[in-house]
Image (tube, grey):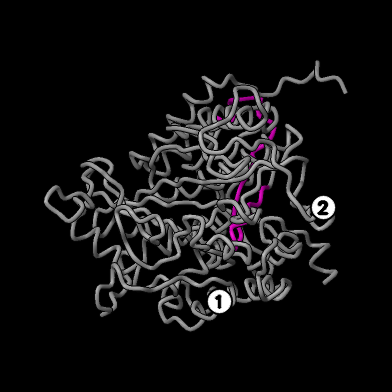
Amino acid sequence: MSTDLRNFLALSYEELEDLNLKAKEQRKNRTPVHKIQEERLKYLTGEKRIKAVTVLFSDLEGRLHMLDYDKKFLLKSWDNLTFDGSSIRGFTAQRESDLRLGIDWCSFYWAPADIFGNGKVLVFGEVIDKDGSPYNADIRGVLKGYAEALHKKEGYTLNAANEIEGFLFKGAEAERHYHETTKFEYVNTGGYYHSLPGDPLRTFIDTTAEVQRAMGFQNEKDHPEVAPSQFEINYSYSEVVNAADQIQLYKLICRQVANKMGLTASFLPKPVVGVNGSGMHTNVSISENGKNLFWDPKGEEKLSKLGWSFIDRILTHGNDICLLLNASVNAYRRLDPHFEAPNQIKASPVDRGSMIRIPIGNEKSMRVEVRSVSPDSNPYLVMYSIFKTGIDGETAKIKNLRQAERYLPDNIYTAIDNFQKAEWTTKLLGADVKGRYAELKIASADRCPRALGTFVKAPEVQYHHEVYNQFLWNLF
């Protein structure tokens, strides 16, 4: 079909980067919401080449959902958007299905037309209950509320950055076809830092990095990872809600770029047995008026007392929150000590088998790295559980807590049991949301063999929450 008559928005990557960095600076400076809302509505009204606004939100398991609203409709109805929550796993029951969708005008993105299509902009949404309050299973809203309350009460800004690993496999929708092929095929076998310019893995990494740069990610470095056909594309620290949004966008961009190449970007934690799995090392710190509160030049490993107490609380609740950081059956294959797996509930500046590492830092970069996070987990749950546990959790009276011989579960059933029994997870999520989350994880686990065994089983992939296929679930 001819496109000669269409005049939809398609900006250069340089223009996109300028716009997205300005929006990011507004978020960083906490520009009043009403000012940003006014600015965005004025922009949408004046920019005739925009046809639709894509509103993004995530379900309880972290699966990203997208709704395209015609721009003219959105301008008239942005404060009265509704959707059927009963169709979203972990949201409302059918009898009470209607939910509202608010617009978080601060989380607005301009996206490359060659990747997302001409004439579209993206914005994150906020799920609102019938009574107008934030919906309790919309963890993005819970995280945002928690972060805002801490800033108001203590002056804290919660900061995070993630190192998200993934695999690039041959064929489009390789995960969907795994039950037919029972294997994933590499596009590259070069390994750590090694990929020739122009080969599929390098082309994928370069293209993804270009898109991220255009969307204001402020890239740092990218490279092939240890395992064959594995990648990692790093970007800068940001405030916690923005950091979690960027995880969702990162995975969306990777999948879209790969799909356009006829390939699959997979964030299964351990899609291939015998090589390193994929993690999502989560680096966190707390600042106050621009000062890094985790930095102390005289502290142990130059980490402050606040930083160490933050670590102690996470170690105390390590088994309680393991299911939130490792959300799938497949994730427990990764917690294998033979492949640098962070399955030991301890803290160390050097031991990469530790759940928590204290990287070398300075006044600006001092941070705590939680290494036991899988890339398929709900990023909002990850951020919320890490920060709330590190700030508000309890500290166990375990001798030598930071180096005690304690281990994370090696299977999802143990993780579910720990999660259900823990008083802390009820305080964290509330009994209702905790129960819903546990039910979802039990449903996935019960569709897979109880023992992991030595090869990845088809149900681990078929019934994985990120590869979700309603047709397959209903055949079970």
* Badge 1 amino acid: Ile
Q: Is residue 87 visible?
A: no
Relative to 453, say whether 143 is above or below: above
User: Quick one: 30 or 332, which is closer to the camera?
Assistant: 332
Q: Residue furthest bottom?
A: 421
Q: Nearer the viewer, residue 99 or 19?
A: 19
- Image quadrant for the C terminus? bottom right
**3D distance between C-alphas at marks 2 and 1:** 30 Å
Is residue 267 something that shows in the picture? yes
Q: Is residue 48 magenta?
A: yes
Residue under the point 71% across and 73% down: 449
In the image, 149 versus 253, the foreground residue is 253
Relative to 21, is 257 on the left or the right? right
Residue named by callout 1:
416
Sequence order check, earlier mark of 2 and 1? 2
Q: Which residue is drawn at the image coordinates 53% and 74% (left, top)?
A: 415
> Where in the figure is residue 346, as x and y percent of width and height?
34, 66
Read off the residue under disc 2.
181
